[in-house]
Image (spheres, rainbow, N blue to C red):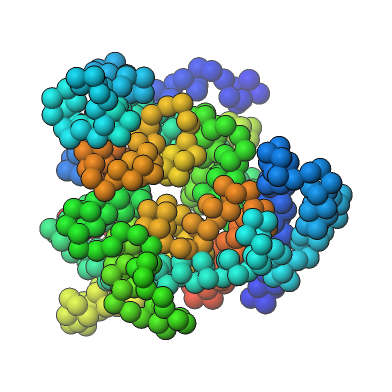
Amino acid sequence: MSGYSLDADTAVDRLRSEVGRAWRVFRFILRDNGAKAGVAIIATFGFLGVFGPMIAPYHPIEDTLQQSGSIMRLQSPGGKAAFGTTSFGKDVLSQFLAGARPTLIVGLFGGIGTGVVGFLVGLTSGYFGGRIDEFLMRLTDLTFALPFLPMALVILSFVTPSVWLITAVLVTFLWKMPARVIRSEVMTVKERTFVKSARARGAGHLRTMFLHVAPNVLGIGFLYTAYAVGWSIVAGASLAFLGFGDPTTTSWGRMLQQVFDSGAIRVAWWWVLPPSIGIGAVTTGVFLVGRAFEEIVNPDLQTDKE
Amino acid sequence: MSFRRFLIKRTIIAALLTLIAVSVIFATLRLLPADPFSGLVASGSLTTEELERIRALYGLDQPIYVQYVKYVQNLFSFNFGISLTQQRPVGDIIVPALINTMVLLLPALVVTAIVSSLAGMYAGWNRGSWFEQSSIVVTTVFRATPIFVTGILFLIIFSYGLGWLPAFGMRSPLANPDGYLDTYLSVDFLRHYILPFTATVLFYSGDFLMLARNSVVERKGSEFLMLHRAKGLSDMEQLGRAGRNSLLPLVTYFALRTGMLFQGVITLEVVFAWPGIGRALVQAILNQDYPTVQAAVFIMALAVIIMNLTADIAYARLDPTIEAGDV
C-alpha cells in the first residue's frame, strides 16, 4: 500500500504543479481592469500593514501633539499634522498608517482560517456523504441560524477582545460559506471516472480526497478564501466600530468608533475620511479580484465568451 | 422520497435546529460572569439580602436546569419575561424595535431586489458592454464597503457638510406622533428615512445584480433560447424568456435575505441612531439584560430557520430538475 497512501514526495510534486497553475490564472485575472485596480489596492494595503507603523511620523497613541504649550485638538490638516489631529491631540496620519496592521491581521488570518476550515469541512462532507454529510450540513444550518454579529458581541462582552480572539470568532461563524459551496462541487467531482478509477486501483480515502478530488475544487476554495478575507475585514471593522475591538491597538474601525462617539464627526472630516476610504478601498479591492477570479473558476459563466 | 415526506423531514429538522440554537444562546449567556445586580452590591446600593430577593424574583436562584426548562417553555410560548434593566416586558421593547427595523429594511430589500435584478439581467444579456462593466464595478464598491462606512460618508456629506438631511434618529426631537400612521407617514419621517434607506439599497444591490447577471449569462447559450431566436423573437422578448428562467435563484435568495432582515443591520442602526432591533440588542448586551438579549436573538434565529425552510421548499417545488430529497 506504500505507493497509495499520501507520501511527502507526491504531495510536494502536486503542490508545485498547482503553484504553476495559480501563476497562470493570476496573469489571466490581471487582464481585467477592475482586478488590476484591486491588486494595486491590496498591494498598497499590504505594504501599509507591514511598514505603516514604521513610517508613521508620530506614535499613534502615546504622542500628543502640542503647539505653543497647548494640546492641538481637532486641528484641520496642515503644519505639523499633515492629516490633522483627533480631539485627543493625536496625529490622524500616524493612526491611519498604524491602523492598517490590525485590519490586515484580522482580514488575512480570519480569511485564511475560514478558507481552510470551510475547505476541509466541505471536502469531508461532500466526499463521504451519508451521515457525516448530514451532521456537518446541519452544523452549517446552525451557524446560519445564530446571528453572527449579535453572538460575537455577546461573546466579546465578557472576554477582553484581542486580535486573535476576534479572528477565532470570525472563523467560527464564517466557515459555513465556503463549506457549502465546496461540498456541492465535491459531490459532482467525486462521481467522475478518474476518482472512481483511483479508488478501484486501491487508493485510500485520504489519498483520493486530497490528490484526486481536492485539486479540482481548489479554485473555488481560493475564491472563497479571498471573499472570506473581505468578510473578515468588514466584520472586524464592524466589531471595532461598535466598541468591541481590541482596546490596545489602533485599527481603522476603532478610529471610526472614536470619531463617531466623540461627536467630532460633525466637523472633523479629516479624521473620518482616511479610515473610511481605507476600509472601503481594501474590501472593494478584494472583491474586485474575487469577481475576476470567479469568471474563470465558475464554468457556467463560460457559455459564450465574445 | 415523496414531497410530503420531504416536507415533514425538513420541518422536523428545522424544529430541532431551533431548539439547539436556543440552547446555545442559553449556554452562552450563562457563561457571562455576573448579572447586572452584582454590580449594585459592590457599589453599596443593594444589601446582600435584597440581592437574594431580587434574584429570586427573576428566578435566578433556581438550579440551572430548572432555569433552562422554564426558559425554553417561555420562549416557545412567546412569553419573554421582564427586562432586567428597564422594568417592563421584553415584548414591549422588542416589538416596536422590530417594526422600526422592518419599516426601514423591507422596502429597501424589495426595491433593490426588483431594480437590481432587472439591471443584472440586462447586464448579463449585454455581456462585455459598458453598462455591464460599470454596473458591476459600482455595485461591487457598495457591496464590499461595510454599510456603516457608507452610512458615515453619507452623514458627513449630506447631513454635516451640506446640511440637507437630519443625521439622528427616526423623527425630530419635537415631533410627537400618535399611532403608526402618523409615525411613518410624515415628511419629517421621510427626511430621516432617505439616508439609511439609500445606504441599504446600495448595499443589497450587488448580490441581486450578480445573481441575475450570472444566471442570464448561464442561460444565454442554451438551446431553448436558440429556438426562440429561430422563431424570430426580438432581443428583448428573448431576454424576457431567459429572465423568467433565471428567477429561481433570485427568489430563493430573496427568501434567505428576508430571514436575515430580522437581525437588522446593527452598525447601520447605530450610525443613524435608528431605534431598531439591532440597536436595542447592542444596548441590552452592554447592560447585561439577559431576557432582552435572549428574546431578540431567539427571534432572529427563528426567522432565519423559517425562511431557510421556505427557501428549501420553494426550491424543491419550483425546480423540476431537483428531486425532492437531494436538496
Residue A237 drawn at (x, y percent): 40, 40
Q: Residue at x 66, y 67 (%)?
A: B89
Residue B107: x and y in percent read 37, 73
Seen in the picture, residue B296 relative to A135 is either above or below; the reply is below
| Residue at left offset 69%, top offset 63% | B82
The residue that appears at 38% across and 32% down in the rendered structure is: A251
Location of residue A92 in the rendering, given as x and y in whole percent from the top left corner? 26, 30
Q: Residue at x 86, y 52 (%)?
A: B62
Image: A146 above or below B221? above
**In the image, is A225 to the left or to the right of A154?**
left
The total of numbered circles placed on residues is 0
Residue B154's spot in the image, x, y percent? 25, 55
Q: Is A214 on the left or on the right of A127, as rendered?
A: left
**Quarter of image, res A15:** top left
| B138 is higher (above) or lower (below) than A224 | below
**Looking at the image, is B234 positioned above or below residue A139?**
below
Choose between B87 and A9: the one closer to the eye.
B87
